[in-house]
Image (cartoon, rainbow, N blue to C red):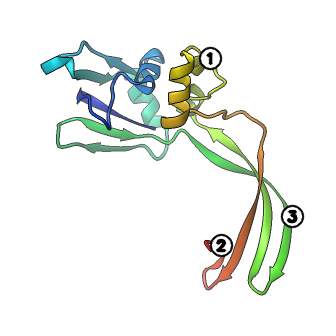
Amino acid sequence: MHFHAGMVIASVDEKPHDPHYRLLEKAGLIKLGKDTGRWGRTTPVAITAKGQELLKQIQGVSQSKEKDGTAAYVVPIAERKLVAISKINKIGTGRATVEITWKWGPNQLGELFDASGPMVKSFNTWDRATLIQKYGAKFYHAEPTTVTLAMVRSGKGWQIATD
């Protein structure tokens, strides 16, 4: 998930009134100010103390300074967790298929972006769809997913086949 803090100018790439900003504000992690500037396109976005504390607790948060003076944040919200390896079938020399089962492991921010959770459900259908399609909301507590991976053995060991 990504967002900017500072004087955020609305653009095709960054929309401070999109649902992910509103969800972060509803959770008390950021504060959206009153729009200013020409045509009201600049929105002050401030990270709250609660937001700063949460970002410190999440591993892998990336922050960078943008040319426009804003701070860009990229925050992981979940990772795939291996549940089981159920089948390994050797299909030739140096080739195999592996059936694995995995589930999502959301962090504290991921819990807010859980598509079946109260925060996401509080938005209208259009905004929920936008959160899911563009901003990382998923059904993080759904049943585990089983997939079959084609694997190939190389000089670096077993890897997922790319061909």
Please determine whether, in this image, residue 1 is positioned above or below residue 7: below
Between 81 and 150, which is closer to the camera in this rendering? 150
Residue 161's mark?
2
Is residue 161 in sight in this rendering?
yes
The amino acid on which the numbered mark 2 sits, given as a three-letter code, is Ala
Q: Dot 1 lies on which element?
A: helix
Q: Earlier in the sequence, mark 3 or mark 1?
A: 3
Measured from the top left, where is residue 145 in percent x and y?
76, 46
Residue drawn at the location 58% of the way across and 36% of the way down: 107
Badge 1: how crowded within 10 Å, few (<14), some, or many (20+)?
few
Residue 37's mark?
none
Q: Nearer the viewer, mark 2 or mark 3?
A: 2
Badge 3: how crowded within 10 Å, few (<14), some, or many (20+)?
few
Q: Nearer the viewer, mark 1 or mark 2?
A: 2
Query: In the shown orientation, is residue 24 left or right of residue 44?
Result: right
Is residue 37 in sight in this rendering?
no
The amino acid on which the numbered mark 3 sits, given as a three-letter code, is Lys
| Residue underneath mark 3 | 87
Image quadrant assignment for residue 149: bottom right
The amino acid on which the numbered mark 1 sits, given as a three-letter code, is Pro
Please determine whether, in this image, residue 161 is positioned above or below residue 55: below
Residue drawn at the location 61% of the way across and 85% of the way down: 155
Query: In the shown orientation, is residue 73 left or right of residue 67?
Result: right
Query: In the shown orientation, is residue 49 left or right of residue 129?
Result: left
The span from disc 3 to disc 1 (Cα, nearest Å) is: 37 Å
Q: Dot 2 lies on which element?
A: loop
Q: Earlier in the sequence, mark 1 or mark 2?
A: 1
Image quadrant assignment for residue 158: bottom right
Measured from the top left, where is residue 162 in percent x and y?
61, 71
Residue 118's mark?
1
Q: Dot 3 lies on which element?
A: strand
Do tag 1 and tag 2 residues touch (Cβ < 8 Å)? no
